[in-house]
Amino acid sequence: MAKKTNTSASQSEASVTTELLHPDYVFETSWEVCNKVGGIYTVLSSRAKTLQEEFGDKNVFIGPDLLSDHKNLDFVEDQKLLPRWKKAAAERGINCRIGRWNVPGNPVAVLVDFTPLFAEKDQIYADAWTKFGVDSIRAYGDYDEASMFSVCAGRAVEAWVKAGLVKGKVIYQAHEWMSGLGMLFLEDACPEVATVFTTHATSIGRSIAGNNKELYAYFSGYHGDQMAEELHMDAKHSIEKQSAHRADCFTTVSTFTDRECKQLLDKPADVVLPNGFEPDFVPVGNKFNTVRRAARKQILQVASALTGSELSDDTLIVSTSGRNDYRCKGFDVFLDTISQLRSALPCEDGKSPSVLALIEVPCWLKGPREDLQTRLSGKEKSETPLPNPIITHDLWNLNDDRIVRQIWQLGFRNLPGDPVKILLVPCYLDGNDGIFNMPYYHLLAANDLALYPSYYEPWGYTPLESCAFRTPCVTTDLSGFGQWVNETLGHEGKLEDGVSVLHRDDSNYWEVTRAMCDVILDMIALAPRRRTEVRRRAAELSDKARWTNFIRHYYQAWDFALRKKQA
């Protein structure tokens, strides 16, 4: 089977019409398969249905087996599914569970138990050095777990290919450095499998930004290998760089990150794979309105119980969210913006509009606050603030948490008379957090405005998700999504477009906070009818970023890899 499209191996302007080679099997491996950690989970799960419709059960996701079946709601094991695959893997020394990923499309998911490989870790690293030049000497942190998982995933596919269970044109796509080592070993053991390596953000670029260095002002002067040594990122960078150079097709998620790969990995992407989203996750019609009303009610009830003050339904709810990456995600900018808002709010007859700011960022979670649970159960009146009314859950390191400390330093106390209140929600919103007990997407639908002032954001799923759930948002032109919005609109995104794209660089921190404060004030000033129009335009923008529009780039990448394998 072949697909006709306009493409070329280099994606250059001189594209030609050609028949794309169509794989018979596609294996995608990631630490985030059935494991919600960050944006890659959304990349894979949101396009699963699109690929399932095209490939059926020959589109297979491989992830780590981290949780027992009764705890992992993302995975539904099926003992009758592909039993010969399970047996072939076991004969190779790999225990795995096979079932379905509980997302739209319900694709096949294989979870591998990588723990037995720790017994041969030293030999694996020695072979990685002699065969591929991957340097693991200064490895630390999550390196060992990720590497053993990726090798386990690669060996599983090797077992299925060599047992004759997987035939024809086979694609193995590894996401991030955490899946790279297994891809390299698979290339060596099964050279007939075409490999694709995708970096969603370079480890060095993220590390430079996260270490408060100026990434953009001195970008052309950075050397990846040198910075890896300086920042003690040698091991991860080594896997990432070797994977980028040795894969049959190297890909990344935006032209923004492609530039970064060329500078820091000495390898530009062969194909750029922008991230899409699908409406399957979004309720429609009256169901959406019901979800939004219920989520707003729950958010305001939690805030009222915590602060001892009644928050009315016309409270403007703004939020930020994402991986706990303080500077890269712009949480520092968000907090300073909300602080500025307090003095900038208009005041009529001694009364200011009510604003509730939510920071939905997983921290070192201890559990839900029992005193807050008691109030929410109705067993205790909510007439006075609870102690430390700026956080919904208990943390193991409350006094050392960076976000908590900045909230305190900015003087937020969430007293009944405060027009601006701020809440840290330090947990994964999976519907079972003990306080909100609603999934993240439902709470996202309740927002009036979402703010994502990123300093380092190769793509930016949170603003795209926000748009899909009809919540206008702010992002920056340092995100791939922000750049895509500007390119799509033909001008810098404004609030009236559904997405406001602010210019950000190494030196305009306070300009960004003032600009974002102005966007909030503009939203407050909008009449209800105009707010509805802005929400509609946000949703329209997300429609242009559907996977049905972006999946063609994956087909191009797979064609590129298959043709290189044939050469």
Image: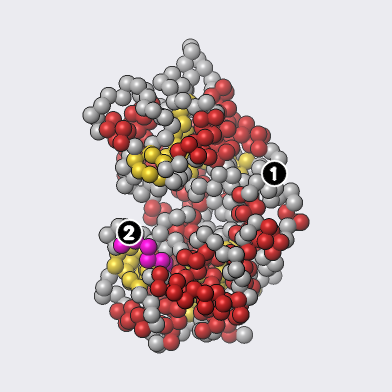
The residue type indicated by label 2 comes to Asn
Element under disc 1 = loop
Whole-percent x, y for residue 43 in the image = 48, 59
Instruction: Please name the residue shown 44% across and 74% down the image.
Output: 119
Taking the magenta stretch, the answer to whether it contains residue 63 is yes
Element under disc 2 = loop
Dot label at residue 469:
none
Quarter occupied by the C terminus: bottom right
Mark 1, residue position:
506
Residue 454 visible somewhere in the drawing: no
Instruction: Please name the residue shown 45% across and 78% down the image.
Output: 155
How many marks can you see?
A: 2
Instruction: Please name the residue shown 35% across and 75% down the image.
Output: 95
CA neighbours of label 2 inside 10 A, class few (<14), some (14 to 19), many (20+): some
In the image, residue 23 sits, relative to residue 423, either above or below, namely below
In the image, residue 1 sits, relative to residue 467, either above or below, namely below
Give 248 or 49, whichever is nearer the viewer: 248
Outermost residue on the top side: it is: 349
Asked if residue 232 lies left or right of residue 437, the reply is: right
Residue 94 visible somewhere in the drawing: yes
Label 1 vs 2, first from the N-terminus: 2
The residue type indicated by label 1 comes to Asp
Asked if residue 553 lies left or right of residue 424, the reply is: right
* Magenta extent: 61-68
Instruction: Please name the residue shown 65% across and 46% down the image.
Output: 212
Mark 2, residue position:
72
Whole-percent x, y for residue 87 in the image = 32, 81
